[in-house]
């Protein structure tokens, strides 16, 4: 079955499945297999000290896949400012990357520079208030992360489901759902709620290509989702480590390759659609 949404069109990828930015781990070894499998992989720029090291990583990823992948700039002022990224923007444009994700803080200046170079600018934020501001600043699309997801938390953050309900009402640009998504049910639900793609972090942390220890992956598989400690970390901002697994850990049952994970989500989604009586050869939000 063909999958066609505003985001697969914008990113020129096969499936509306995006691998989230990863501090430490967001490198070619993860991004390239995700893109190679038809998803959209992301290299996280702040894993590199300078623009030339980022360029080397982009070249490495290009050697691993001919498919498109993106770069994330996580703005964490004063530690990682716009200035840190401006030289990287030039490299990214020079290397022909067509989509940049920014996240966390205001990215209007970077966005304007990207638009000048005909590069897609997608900003990731944690609240609808920031999603609306992002739209007003001219982003091409927005990722909205619900409170059940991993990453930076905002005091007034909503759930992924409520974000999607509100995004349909308040946004004119395409939105991508993130937070707690990791299987076919979550993926299809998000698309049916108006999202044009999903962005997943936790479940990609458990794939074979992600270089965390086997022990950590085993811990994810065994994680009790009713553990009060997990609950406190995810919902009550009590994690010192903003990159610990989210509630999506509940769907991690085995260690798969990125391709096996994507194929499973797509295959099971197609089964669900057929059970619902869908008879088309293309599922999508655009003609
Ligand atoms: C190991 C790890 C590191 C992350 N690092 C970053 C980061 O540096 N920048 C960022 O914008 N998001 C980061 N995130 C958040 C993800 O990109 C994504 O938005 C989030 O994981 C989605 O929620 P989920 O984990 O429930 O799928 C990280 C997530 C994980 C699991």
Image (tube, rainbow, N blue to C red):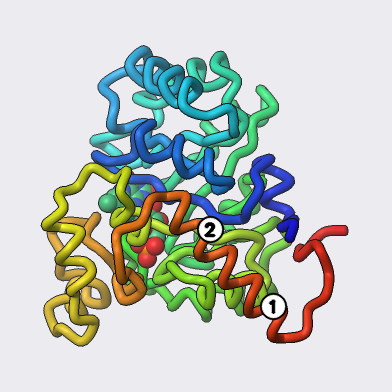
Is 6 located above or below residue 189 in the figure?
Answer: above
Taking the spot 48% from the left edge, 42% from the top edge, the residue there is 41
Disc number placed over residue 12 in the picture, else none? none
Q: Residue at x 26, y 37 (%)?
A: 78
Q: Is residue 285 left or right of residue 31?
A: right
Residue 53 appears left or right of 62 = left
Please indicate whether residue 7 sits to the left or right of residue 54 in the image: right
Question: In the depicted view, which residue is nearer to us: 206 or 71?
Answer: 206
Compare residues 214 and 124 and report the one nearer the observer.
Answer: 214
Q: Which residue is mark 2?
A: 263
Reading the chain from its start, which is encountered first: label 1 or label 2?
2
Q: Where does residue 265 sit, x and y in percent of width and height?
A: 52, 65
Q: Residues within 10 Å of mark 1 (few under 14, many from 20)?
A: some
Q: Quadrant of the C terminus?
A: bottom right
Nearest the eye: 225 or 131: 225
Task: Residue 11: give x, y in percent of width and height.
Answer: 65, 42
Q: CA distance from mark 1 to mark 2?
A: 15 Å
Residue at mark 1:
273
Could you tell me which secondary element the residue under label 2 belongs to?
Answer: helix
**Ligand number 1: quarter of image:** bottom left
Dividing the picture into quadrants, the one containing residue 197 is bottom right
Q: Is mark 1 within 8 Å of ligand 1?
A: no
Q: Is the Cβ of the residue at disc 1 closer than 8 Å to that at disc 2?
A: no
Tally the numbered discs: 2
Which residue is drawn at the image coordinates 48% and 16% (left, top)? 91
Q: Residue at x 38, y 22 (%)?
A: 57
Query: Circle 2: is it few (<14), some (14-19), or many (20+) Cα within 10 Å?
Result: some
Q: Secondary structure at mark 1?
A: helix
């Amino acid at each position: 079955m063909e999958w066609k949404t505003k985001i697969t069109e914008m990113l020129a990828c096969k499936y509306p499945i995006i691998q989230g930015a990863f501090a430490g781990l967001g490198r070619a070894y993860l991004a390239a297999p995700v893109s190679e499998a038809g998803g959209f992989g992301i290299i996280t720029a702040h894993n590199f000290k300078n623009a030339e090291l980022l360029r080397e990583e982009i070249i490495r990823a290009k050697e691993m896949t001919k498919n498109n992948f993106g770069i994330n700039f996580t703005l964490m002022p004063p530690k990682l400012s716009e200035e840190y990224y401006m030289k990287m923007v030039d490299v990214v444009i020079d290397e022909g990357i067509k989509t940049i994700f920014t996240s966390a803080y205001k990215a209007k200046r970077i966005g304007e520079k990207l638009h000048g170079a005909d590069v897609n600018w997608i900003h990731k934020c944690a609240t609808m208030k920031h999603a609306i501001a992002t739209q007003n600043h001219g982003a091409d699309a927005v990722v909205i992360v619900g409170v059940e997801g991993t990453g930076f938390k905002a005091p007034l953050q909503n759930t992924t489901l409520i974000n999607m309900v509100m995004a349909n009402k308040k946004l004119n640009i395409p939105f991508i759902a993130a937070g707690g998504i990791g299987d076919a049910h979550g993926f299809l639900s998000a698309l049916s709620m108006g999202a044009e793609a999903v962005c997943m972090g936790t479940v990609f942390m458990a794939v074979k290509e992600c270089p965390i220890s086997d022990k950590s992956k085993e811990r994810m598989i065994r994680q009790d989702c009713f553990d009060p400690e997990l609950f406190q970390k995810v919902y009550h901002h009590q994690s010192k480590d903003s990159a610990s697994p989210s509630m999506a850990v509940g769907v991690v049952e085995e260690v798969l390759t990125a391709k096996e994970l994507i194929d499973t989500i797509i295959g099971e989604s197609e089964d669900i659609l057929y059970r619902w009586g869908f008879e088309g050869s293309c599922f999508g939000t655009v003609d």
